[in-house]
Amino acid sequence: MELTRLGFLKLVGFATSCLAFGGSVWANSDQGGKTNFVTKPKGMLMDLTQCIGCKNCQAACQKQNQLQGGAYAEELSSNAWTVVKTVEVEKGSEKVKRFVRSQCFHCLEPACASACPVKALHKTPEGPVVYDAWKCIGCRYCMVACPFGIPKYEWEKTAPLVTKCLFCSSRLKEGQQPACAAACPTKATLFGNRDELLVEAERRINNNPNKYVNYIYGLKEGGGTSFLFLSDVPFKDLGFPTNIPNTPLPDYTWEVMSKIPGIIAGGGILLTSTYLLTHKNEGESKKKIEGKGA
Amino acid sequence: MGFKFHWTWSRVILLLIMAVGAIATFLRYSQGLGASTNLSDSYPWGLWIAFDVLCGVALAAGGFTAAATVYIFNLKKYHAIVRPAVLTGFIGYFLVAVGLLYDLGRPWFIWHPIIMWQHHSVMFEVAWCVMLYLTVLFLEFCPVIFERFRLEGALRVIHACTIPLVIMGIILSTLHQSSLGSLFLIVPGKLYPLWYSPFLPVFFFTSAVAVGLAMIVVESTLSSLAFKRGLETPLLADLTKALPFILVFYFVIKIADLAARGSLSLLFNGSYESISFLAELAIGVIVPASILSFRNLRQQTVWQFLSCLMVVCGVVLNRINVCLIGMSRSAGQGYVPAWTEFSITLALVSFGVMAYIWITENFPVFEDHGDKAGA
Ligand code: SF4
Ligand code: SF4
Ligand code: SF4
């Protein structure tokens, strides 16, 4: 078959489209593959009704991250990324004790990450919100922004860093579960894929409607978090913040930040035209005035 | 061509304040933030952000207000206010940058936002605005330096750029003044509802315009008193005519916003927040707006000065309210700055005053000061 000029061009065109199509399929499949097998977002389900307050998770976190807070710290600090607090609450007519874990919730749209001016904090597709210490300038806006008050600072150091639970992201990469989940004797801290944990949480509530309060903490808070909580007493009584909007917090600032290009363009046009209007009668003298300077 | 500097008692005192500040500075950098300040995990931001940064930027607003009045709206009779206002703006912004060096945990990385971008972050915008506007203010002030050293060529170049520089300066200021309010948009659950509003950036900008004008008056009256070099009372009276309008506008949008969010009842609930909020409005808005609406009061130096000083205090209180008092309930505890924090803040202010004095004494900032070209 003789290859004409037109035919050749067609062939080249066809080959190019094949490459482009193949390329896009490859790119997509790569991403799809990741979502399905590697990066399906992880989460944790903390069922407070199953927590016995042994603080094994706290000790495991200390060990895993080489912290010096001691396994019995009562408050989060740069040396205690998770703590188990004992809270006395009224349940019906009786006083009961509950054990409440607190740590970073790994928000789906984290306020801390959107606040950081240098992208030292970011949400990974796997779930953890991680911290690139070398970027941090120490402005502490992340601490102000976090609705749960989670990031803590190394105040005692002269080159301090921000600290918080990192969802054991290095263990996750190796296919292991977080140290705290591995240490939990009752499965009160359960690790898994967030969507499956959600189904499990709903199942528990539906099977025991008299036991649980009908609320999954973390489902909607601030647009949702990777860590989910179940409880048999109202979350408010346990000290969970209950005034967090369901809108992702970064949306509040983006509302304004996204207008900046418009403000620059609009402002430039407005100011220039005002200037031209107010100076239009000056003709020759205008040059002189400008010449006289600021 | 030599520079002069006269020693007076007040200048000696300023210098002493700076000396104490130097000790506090040594403590800050040798011991870290924890040991040398009262900042904590509950109060990651304290006096330095509330006063040095938020108030510093607001009080430096005279620069863009004056430039807009004279160059954009072509009100030439106010020409004399531009140079002093730009100078204060420049010193103010310079001190904001220095204040940040104290506050940042890792100040040696202050340049990171230049190469590490996060355009969703208001802090990123703040960082860029400080850098760019500081540059613009410096360029706007350059004619004064070039005149002092009689650099004719450089003078011609910079004059050609005046208008673009002024426009850039106004846009940057608008962004920056409002962005300091936007910083708090991300804390809807933490900031007390009297202050939290989606209109925070608008409030910050409007109050900055007001305080810009007020600062020009305060500063000018003080320099007339201190070294017989300032602007005349009638000119300032004329300038302050605009203040009541801006203040009333501010007042109306503040109240309308509270009403729209259903928070009006919080105004008189007797909490410390409501008292602080009312104080801020009374001192900074209602009283000065009332005084300045009377023509004969406006024309007397004393009333003019006092009411503008009140506007300044009101805005300072507003920034402290938003950054510290309004956040205290969610922080679960109070915060009183350590002596080192006060000392460094005072030292920075003293440095600013000294710099202002020295520059106005040695450079043609005020009109009567050997500036033959007219300015
Ligand atoms: S809980 Fe706080 S620190 Fe953790 S991801 Fe959410 S905003 Fe960031
Ligand atoms: S303190 Fe560090 S991590 Fe936090 S917002 Fe500032 S630069 Fe980012
Ligand atoms: S996930 Fe890892 S870092 Fe987070 S609390 Fe558990 S052990 Fe600590």
Image (cartoon, grey):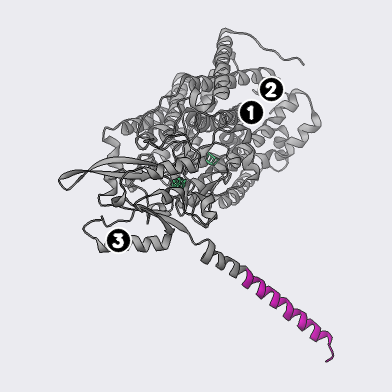
Instruction: Name the residue tied to disc 1.
Output: B83
Instruction: Name the residue tied to disc 3.
Output: A204
Say what amino acid the circle numbered 2 marks. Answer: Pro
Of label 2 and label 1, which has the lower sequence position? 1
Say what amino acid the circle numbered 1 marks. Answer: Arg
* Start-end of magenta stretch: A1-26
Residue B294 placement (x, y as % from top left): 41, 28
Residue B148 falls in which quadrant of the image?
top right
Do the CB atoms of the residues marked 2 and 1 lie less than 8 Å apart? yes
Tell me the SS state at disc 1.
helix
Say what amino acid the circle numbered 3 marks. Answer: Arg
Tell me the SS state at disc 2.
loop
Chain letter belonging to callout 3:
A
Chain letter belonging to callout 2:
B
Q: Is B369 in front, or is A252?
A: A252
Instruction: Name the residue tied to disc 2.
Output: B364
Q: Nearer the viewer, mark 3 or mark 1?
A: 3
Write the residue at 68% across / 28% down: B375
